[in-house]
């Protein structure tokens, strides 16, 4: 059950509602938004009686029964798609959004060249890792704060928004002071301490699906962030781990369509990690547009053969430019179908 | 290594070439086509020397070194895409081909209604199972020959080609006498006795990827059919088995793009088994067109709620009609890109 | 529901019972054993009423409600473990049974050397493939009937029972004329035509779990064989396909314990395919004994470095001898626990 | 390459060695133990020349070439098994070690009852979660520091060592002040910030294999902890995620045997998470002893039906007592085989 309070309800009114809910044996989680408070109700009890009783209270705007284990992120709670705004750009809205850039921030020249290149092709965000999760302790671990500063420079030079990974709750504040979107990597999708901290970070979060996480688990992890106070969550399908080794991961592209049914949160696709192979990225990107993703996050490096990480899956700038051109007619179809949906909704 | 003999080589000439190859320590597999013989060479030996020696023989048209473990089906052997023709329709050519129909042939009324419905929407083949692989021995096992006869009636009524599954080498001849394309189900992808028999069946074969088969294994199974004499093989991605249970299978859509790199055989997508959920079929079908599949095989039933099998993933006729209309602009883009490839090839 | 008829019921009596069952809306499958007929009932209807009505009939000995989708093979149907007898040896009884031998029958010298070697160490069955399922059409496909004859020679020389694979329903009769146990490989676990034929083959069947088959699917495949008339089925865990590539497959050893809960059929373990690595076979074999498998099937080759297939996972004869010696104290514990179970049952 | 310095080398001597190594183009990672410094060398260069040159330096005791990507944890670096000591108990030594207790610390009565119960049966460590990783934000998240205090009370009452999970680098110091072993859960196996912090925590670490982590990745994560200064790492197989849903996870028991080949670190088995089903725990535990694990970590709850988490897989105290008795003869065999190994080593 989710209860939306009327705008500008007082603390006292909210407490009254919470008390009523607890009388029915439920637990209460409330989120304070800027304009209104939303109360999440979980546990076992007489749902129908509780709903009726609470809906009758004057301070309550709406009370909805939600059958899924995730509440705030479910379509039942919010039938219309959510738009997440970062650096003035809307994700989940009328524009198909491309985020692009290198795996790692390596140096000023590299990141500026990448930023200018991808901006010129129509990307809206620059990706690039300053904190790098690496399987081996002996591999390059990222430039850390120095990398964040270089990303900031690239933002100043190009106007691109910045998306970059944060790996520890200890670094959330630091990364949030430079980035427009905080990226949570696949290995941290169930780092619950980190997810809780993101609830209070004041920045949109891009949550990558874990390598062996189910769609339900992905939504539960998003629910962590939202239940802890931050409703600006973007989901990302980046391939799952299966028996197939011909590609780096197996892109579960159907997940994009299924997530669009289950949640109102924006969903983007990472064709680079999903394939691990440069030549497959454009084809999978087309499929991503066609299936209805809200955007792409693509690895692009000015000189992939010299990249310190993920060179094999990075496009160079001319390849990225060609891909963006080739995507145009698909993006046009994407837009018409969004408009059609919007027209129906009106 | 693959050796193409000149047209109308004599048996003696072929034997000379084979002997030469064996002198280098290799094993020889030859396929007799209608016009020319092709010799596949496998084993360990001095490739360069053998190639040079054989190419110098007057009866030999071309000798190609092939690094992949699959030979005849690899792009190295045949750089241009193969067109498989069935019931006068080309698969792998300039048209995007849709095969549609119910999971099982149930009775005359059902199959005729399905056939007329899908033909009216632009499908070129009618699918429908007469021999059904069922997990439980107590489930409906198909109408067998009676089902084949009903499919034939539907063909006469609509002109649609027929694609239907064969499950045992014992039934190949029977099924081939009714069907235009023999379908090999996921569970039989490595039924090697069946694959060998298909080499001599005189019909195109649609080979579905096994639930836990790698792309390489799929190509090796196709190689079985081709090496035993039948080069008309169509591959089909239908989802693989992973830890995710939100969908019936996990569609490895990237496999379509990767297969297009590795093999010249046509590749089609089965969005019905890949998702197991009707509502996801249109979105995944769009993705299939966009990524470059040669066609779709879709479950359509006049009354899915009464279907004896796979009702949950079957579209009804109005849903199929809507999906086909919505696919049109994507198919147009597909055609332009095929023409672009063809223009480059010329 | 499963109905056991009294011994020596007449056809008429059986028909009466079947008719009664059909009156309740169910479907009927009957198995004629040597002494009595057993009737399997599937479908939807009023279970309680049907049970009561049938139990009251004089010809009926016992009527049992079975909730699992597999009926004859479930523990609910038969609480005591089944003993399968082949070549006079009981599998599923008081002795821990080892089957051993090479992957493929290669020639007379090899198979006789293997047979004598493994017999000397206490193996009761000789394994060895005459029909080989190979991923590549260019790999050695087995000696076929010639191989069966060599196995027969080895049996005459050593007294060992013979277990060998059959890959097609067309070969069942041939293989059954030489072998004591017909082995169904992982790739054929859902070759339903083959399973049906095995119902009438007159030989015990060893059914290997498919690479990506669930435990439930394995039991359903066993149910196929039993429902078609052959209750002598032995199950075999041989590793499943997962993301892990450090071993050839991932041994789902817990499946052995779970199968012992769910079914009365004997369960054996194949540590060779499960690991793909010789050095791991003895350790996994110990675990197999400890967890309560009824036996092992192990690849042993007199000269693994010269084996035409699976050399890396084959033990040589001294390694096998050492393993068998090292297993002895574990087998002793196994026997005490079987005796303890038997004592409780009495 | 790994370089062991002589005992009590000076900083200057160490620097000289590092400089020499860098001259060959390598990167250097050093670990300062209490008695001696060990230098890990990674990167590309002339291994043979570098080894020879460094071995000739007087301060160097030993220089070993290591081919695996993990260095300090590999058997090549240290052929003899490592003993990790916690609360005076040796793990990886001559005794088979059992850790047992509830999933979560719930209250004083529960944890004391559990502790006394498992201690009486021979367990050496009490497990129990104070910080709980839960898929849903609405599930019980653990008593946190209050739970740690209760664990400490249980230790005082029973003398058992304490093992408990830490989920964030921020909590490492706190948890280390109460626990004898810090447990890293499957979801955090690649939480690299946490792994680095554990390098300086002053406590042994039990590292659980991630749900979809390869054995190589597990060893790389252990390498993180060791390379950051803490060589007291215990590995734990707890089941991986596969397509099979009959058990909670699929126990990759072969991993225990393979890890014993690849690493000198102790390896223990968690039969509770591996199965998710109480009735399977004793059988899998027997297999764990037989295959050569160094110990078990088992969920035991005084009243599993009232447990706030993981009740279905928890044994009650009489079940645990029975299991421990039944394991005794297997543990005896385990000890003889350890003694046999030790005798050979001498």
Image (cartoon, coloured by chain):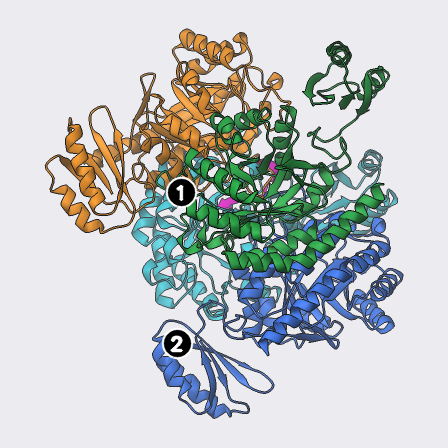
Chain colours: A green, B blue, C cyan, D orange
Quick one: D239 or A130, which is closer to the camera? A130
Asked if residue C268 lies in the magenta stretch, the reply is: yes
Q: Position of residue C198 (x, y in %)?
A: 62, 58
Image side of residue B239 versus residue C97, left or right:
right
Q: Which segment is the magenta one?
A: C261-271
| Quadrant into which the N terminus of chain B falls | bottom left
| Residue drawn at x 61%, y 28% as measured from the top left | A225
Asked if residue C263 lies in the magenta stretch, the reply is: yes
Crowd tier of the residue under label 1, counting other residues whose Cα lies within 10 Å: few below 14, some 14–19, many 20 or above: some
Quick one: C321 or B129, which is closer to the camera? B129
> Picture quarter containing residue B197?
bottom right
Secondary structure beneath label 1: helix
Image height of D296 relative to D108, above or below: below
Number of callouts: 2
| Residue drawn at x 57%, y 63% as measured from the top left | B259
Image height of D145 relative to C343, above or below: above
Q: Which residue is mark 2?
A: B26
Q: Position of residue C64 (x, y in %)?
A: 73, 36
Q: Position of residue D342 (x, y in %)?
A: 24, 33
Q: Which residue is mark 1?
A: D216
**Residue B117 visible in the snapshot:** yes
Dot 2 and dot 1 within a common chain:
no
Label 2: chain? B
**Residue D122 visible in the snapshot:** no
Q: Position of residue D227 (x, y in %)?
A: 32, 33
């Amino acid at each position: 059950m989710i209860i939306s309070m009327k705008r500008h309800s007082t603390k006292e009114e909210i407490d009254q509602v919470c008390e009523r809910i607890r009388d029915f044996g439920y637990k209460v989680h409330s989120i304070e938004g800027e304009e209104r408070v939303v109360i999440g109700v979980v546990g076992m009890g007489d749902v129908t009686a509780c709903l009726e009783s609470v809906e009758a209270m004057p301070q309550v705007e709406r009370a909805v029964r939600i059958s899924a284990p995730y509440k705030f992120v479910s379509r039942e709670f919010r039938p219309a798609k959510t738009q997440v705004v970062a650096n003035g750009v809307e994700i989940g809205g009328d524009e198909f959004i491309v985020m692009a850039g290198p795996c790692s921030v390596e140096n000023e020249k590299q990141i500026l060249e990448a930023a200018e290149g991808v901006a010129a092709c129509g990307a809206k965000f620059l990706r690039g890792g300053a904190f790098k999760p690496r399987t081996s302790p002996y591999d390059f671990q990222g430039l850390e704060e120095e990398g964040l500063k270089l990303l900031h420079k690239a933002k100043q030079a190009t106007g691109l928004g910045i998306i970059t990974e944060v790996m520890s709750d200890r670094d959330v504040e630091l990364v949030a002071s430079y980035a427009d979107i905080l990226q949570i990597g696949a290995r941290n999708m169930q780092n619950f301490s980190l997810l809780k901290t993101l609830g209070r970070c004041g920045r949109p979060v891009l949550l990558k699906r874990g390598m062996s996480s189910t769609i339900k688990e992905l939504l539960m992890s998003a629910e962590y962030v939202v239940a802890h106070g931050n409703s600006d969550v973007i989901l990302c399908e980046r391939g799952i781990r299966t028996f197939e080794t011909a590609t780096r991961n197996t892109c579960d592209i159907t997940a994009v369509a299924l997530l669009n049914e289950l949640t109102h949160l924006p969903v983007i696709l990472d064709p680079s990690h999903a394939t691990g192979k440069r030549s497959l990225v454009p084809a999978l990107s087309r499929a991503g547009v066609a299936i209805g993703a809200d955007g792409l996050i693509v690895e692009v490096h000015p000189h992939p053969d010299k990249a310190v990480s993920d060179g094999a899956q990075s496009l160079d700038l001319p390849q990225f430019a060609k891909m963006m051109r080739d995507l145009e007619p698909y993006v046009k179809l994407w837009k018409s179908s969004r408009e059609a949906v919007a027209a129906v909704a009106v």
